[in-house]
Amino acid sequence: MCVAIQEMIEDGRAEGRNEGRSEGEVRKLIEQTCKKLRKRQTSETIADALEEDPAYIQSIVKVAQKYAPDYDLDLIFQNFFK
C-alpha cells in the first residue's frame, strides 16, 4: 500500500512539474510577443520571428492589445486562458 501511495505522490509531482513548464513556456511567449508589440510589429511578423503558429500569436495579440501600452504580463496571462 505504501508503494502505491508513493507512486501516486510522484505522479502528482510529475504532473505539476509538466503543468508548470507549460505555463512557463506560454508566459515566455506572451512576454516575447509583448516586447515585439511595443516595437509595433505585426502579429504575422512576430509569428515569423518566433517561429510560432500565426493563429496562436494572433490570439495572444488579441488579448494583449487590451492592456496596451503597458502590457501587464500577469493580466494578459490570466485572461489568455479565459
Image: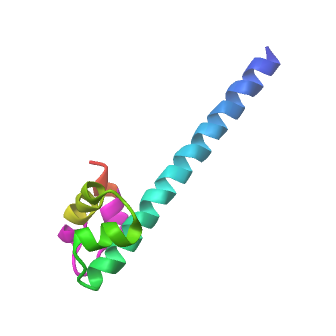
What is the magenta segment's predominant secondary structure?
helix
Farthest residue to the right: give it: 2
Reply yes or no: does residue 36 show up in magenta. no
Q: Nearer the viewer, residue 11 or 28?
A: 28
Instruction: Indicate whether residue 75 is drawn in magenta.
Output: yes
Q: Quadrant of the N terminus?
A: top right
- In percent of width and height, residue 52 lies at 37, 60
Q: How is the image coloured?
A: rainbow
Which residue does the image show at 50% across and 50% down from the upper left?
A: 22
**In the orientation shown, which residue stands out farthest toward the top?**
1
Task: Say which quarter of the image contains residue 55.
Answer: bottom left
**On the image, which quarter does residue 9 sit in?**
top right
Number of numbered discs present? 0
Residues rendered magenta in the picture: 64-77
Q: Residue 6: x and y, percent?
A: 76, 27
Above or below residue 27? Residue 72 is below
Q: Which sits in the foreground, 27 or 36? A: 36
Left or right of 30, for residue 69: left
Residue at (66% x, 31% y) in the render:
11
State the residue at coordinates (52%, 45%): 19
